[in-house]
């Protein structure tokens, strides 16, 4: 299968690219190389005859037409997006442009290509989204997001992703475009850009800086190891039912405070401080506006219909992640000076 992956130089996209090439798929990586992208993320497959790279903005319809006509993909995996909630609070326009208009341009380009090719039944447009479109859950372990949970986005980021989900469904219903959708929980793992919680905590700990936790740290997330996610995404694009959505979760709920304490304990073991624990650096900071209390996914559909389940616990995945950051200082050092990295964003005034 030849797969066109948008955002393939980003965190989740690069995991998909690496795994797809390893499994023998041809991959066309389309990425605009904005601040969070890094071609080092796909360096391990860059010389493969199965890999091609196109630097292009998904909002550029003419560029997308050229790329579709040139590479003639069998499937699209659309991951390109602005994804940091804090940045969406400070500057929502980029999220509207990329996540909504960019998805529109991708749908139009894919639809034109699919139509001109005679509407092959094997073609797939896989839209990758987030569980944040469902809003916030109460602290009740019996209540989780399902594919039928009503949309209730709370941030500019989640609103833009909800909009893109609706566009994809509309293009399926109106034009017959063969689509599948997935909504995932919080990802973590190797190559995670250092503005999200897990890499921020690891790198601040190593630098002797405060470990910032929003509010009282009680916000709960369902943590999904990025390589497990990539495995699920490839399964859905290959075997998912057309027009259907699949929730992908790690079945690993942890509060932000507990997650940070776990990271500190792993660091204490792997690279002990001269004295004390990394947990001594924990600092509680003003909460993010509209901070959702809890996300948790019920992955029954993908487990029962496609046979997928996560392979690692959050403790195992975090240990792998910490070790990767300890072993790859050159990678993250090169990203420290990028715009916004290390700054507190999303205060909304």
Image (cartoon, rainbow, N blue to C red):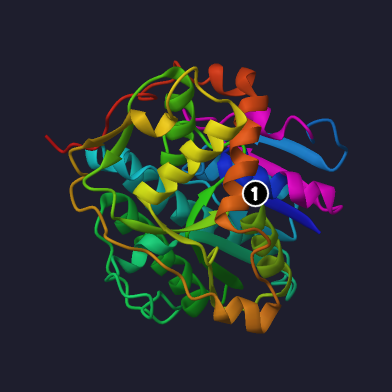
Measured from the top left, where is residue 239 in percent x and y? Answer: 72, 74
Establish if 174 lies above or below 288. Answer: below
User: Which residue does the numbered mark 1 point to in the structure image?
Assistant: 5
**Count of marks, rendered view:** 1
Place of residue 341 in the rendered image (x, y in percent of width and height, measured from the top left): 39, 25
Q: Is residue 55 visible?
A: no
Q: Does residue 136 appear left or right of residue 44 in this picture?
A: left
Q: Which residue range is magenta in the image?
A: 18-44
| Residue 88 in magenta stretch | no
Q: Position of residue 53 (x, y in %)?
A: 71, 35
Q: Position of residue 245 (x, y in %)?
A: 53, 75
Secondary structure under tag 1 reads strand
Q: Quadrant of residue 159?
A: bottom left
Q: Residue at x 21, y 45 (%)?
A: 215
Indicate left or right for 172 with 89 as reference.
Answer: right
The foreground one among 271 and 196 is 271
In this rendering, position of residue 131 left or right of residue 192 = left
Residue 35 can be seen in this image = yes
Horizontal side of 59 relative to 119 (left or right) equals left
The part of the image, by quadrant, that contains residue 126 is bottom right
User: Foreground: 10 or 322?
Assistant: 322
């Amino acid at each position: 299968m030849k797969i066109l992956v948008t955002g393939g130089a980003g965190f989740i996209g690069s995991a998909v690219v690496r795994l797809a090439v390893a499994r023998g798929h041809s991959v066309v990586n389309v990425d605009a190389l904005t601040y969070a992208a890094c071609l080092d993320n796909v360096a391990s497959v860059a010389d493969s005859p199965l890999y091609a790279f196109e630097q292009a903005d998904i909002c550029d319809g003419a560029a997308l037409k050229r790329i579709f006509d040139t590479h003639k993909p069998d499937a699209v995996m659309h991951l390109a997006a602005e994804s940091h909630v804090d940045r969406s609070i400070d500057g929502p326009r980029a999220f509207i442009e990329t996540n909504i208009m960019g998805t529109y341009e991708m749908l139009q380009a894919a639809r034109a290509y699919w139509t001109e090719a005679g509407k092959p039944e094997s073609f797939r447009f896989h839209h990758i989204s987030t569980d944040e479109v469902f809003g916030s859950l109460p602290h009740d372990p019996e209540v989780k997001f399902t594919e039928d949970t009503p949309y209730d986005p709370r941030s500019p980021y989640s609103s833009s992703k909800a909009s893109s989900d609706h566009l994809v469904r509309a293009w399926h219903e109106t034009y017959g475009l063969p689509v599948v959708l997935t909504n995932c929980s919080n990802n973590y793992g190797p190559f995670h850009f250092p503005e999200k919680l897990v890499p921020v905590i690891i790198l601040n700990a190593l630098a002797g800086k405060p470990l910032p936790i929003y509010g009282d740290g009680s916000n709960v997330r369902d943590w999904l190891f990025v390589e497990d996610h990539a495995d699920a995404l490839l399964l859905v694009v290959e075997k998912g039912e057309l027009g259907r959505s699949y929730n992908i979760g790690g079945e690993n709920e942890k509060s932000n405070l507990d997650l940070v304490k776990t990271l500190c304990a792993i660091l204490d073991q792997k690279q002990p401080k001269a004295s004390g624990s990394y947990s001594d650096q924990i600092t509680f900071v003003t909460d993010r506006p509209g901070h959702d209390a809890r996300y948790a996914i019920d992955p029954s559909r993908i487990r029962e219909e496609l046979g997928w389940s996560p392979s690692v616990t959050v403790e195992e995945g975090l240990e792998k992640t910490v070790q990767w950051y300890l072993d790859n200082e050159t990678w993250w050092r090169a990203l420290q000076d990028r715009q916004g990295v290390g700054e507190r964003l999303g205060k909304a005034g």
